[in-house]
Image (cartoon, rainbow, N blue to C red):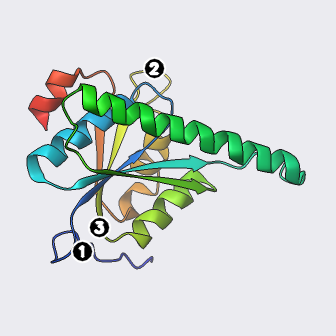
Amino acid sequence: MTQIKKRRSFEAGHFRKFLLIVDESQEVDAALFYAASRIQRSSGSLVMLYVIVPQEFQHWINVRQQQVEEETTKAKALFRLFRRKLNLAGFEDVASEEVIREGAKGEEIRKLIDEDEDIAVIVLGASADQAGPGPLVSSLAVGTAAGSFPIPITIVPGTLELEVIKALA
């Protein structure tokens, strides 16, 4: 059994952080706005994580390096886009930090949570697609890892409108 580290978000010198996994899916907006609404109402900050998943052709160092550079540029663009969305939606006072990691998505999420004891909640957007809620929700919140996940997982339906999300948060 894995040892779960104590969260320190309410101790002196610490504050609660909401973790958002950044990607290009449509449902991530609902998770972004829900996390920002919770932060406005209860304090804290937002951690936006982008994970660069290595491709199969890792034995070609130049190709791998180019992929990492392109993904890093894409991550930074998504961070800027999400900050603009927050500002336009009235969340300009929500503090955020940006983290870029390279590796398997699930492993990197767990590593970050383990390293940052202020991360207290992960917020995921669920797809309304008939194929399922999305790979991240399926693997973290529905799969076998859900029962041993180190922090609560909040799943936000990806179809919710901003005003509904603000009312729920």
Asked if the residue under mark 1 is in contact with the one under mark 3, i.e. CB atoms within 8 Å, the reply is: yes
Of circles 2 and 1, the one toward us is 1
In the displayed structure, does residue 168 sit left or right of residue 87? left
Residue 56 position within the rendered picture, expressed as x and y whole percent measured from the top left: 81, 46
**Secondary structure at numbered mark 1:** loop
> In the figure, residue 113 lies in which quadrant?
bottom left
* Disc sitting over residue 82 in the figure: none
**Secondary structure at numbered mark 2:** loop
* Disc sitting over residue 118 in the figure: 3
Residue labelled with disc 2: 130
> In the figure, residue 35 lies in which quadrant?
top left
Residue situated in front as seen by the camera: 86 or 147: 86
Mark 2 neighbour density, 10 Å: few (under 14) some (14–19) many (20 or more): few
Of circles 2 and 3, the one toward us is 3
Residue 38 position within the rendered picture, expressed as x and y whole percent measured from the top left: 17, 45
* Residue 113 appearing in the image: yes
Residue labelled with disc 1: 8
In the displayed structure, does residue 146 sit left or right of residue 162? right
Asked if the residue under mark 1 is in contact with the one under mark 2, i.e. CB atoms within 8 Å, the reply is: no
Q: Residue at the spot x=48%, y=28% of the render?
A: 25
Q: Is residue 169 above or below residue 51?
A: above
Of mark 2 and mark 1, the one earlier in the sequence is: 1
Residue 73 position within the rendered picture, expressed as x and y whole percent measured from the top left: 61, 40
Q: Residue at the spot x=38%, y=34% of the render?
A: 82
Please identify the quadrant where the N terminus is shown. Answer: bottom left
C-alpha gap between disc 2 and disc 3: 35 Å
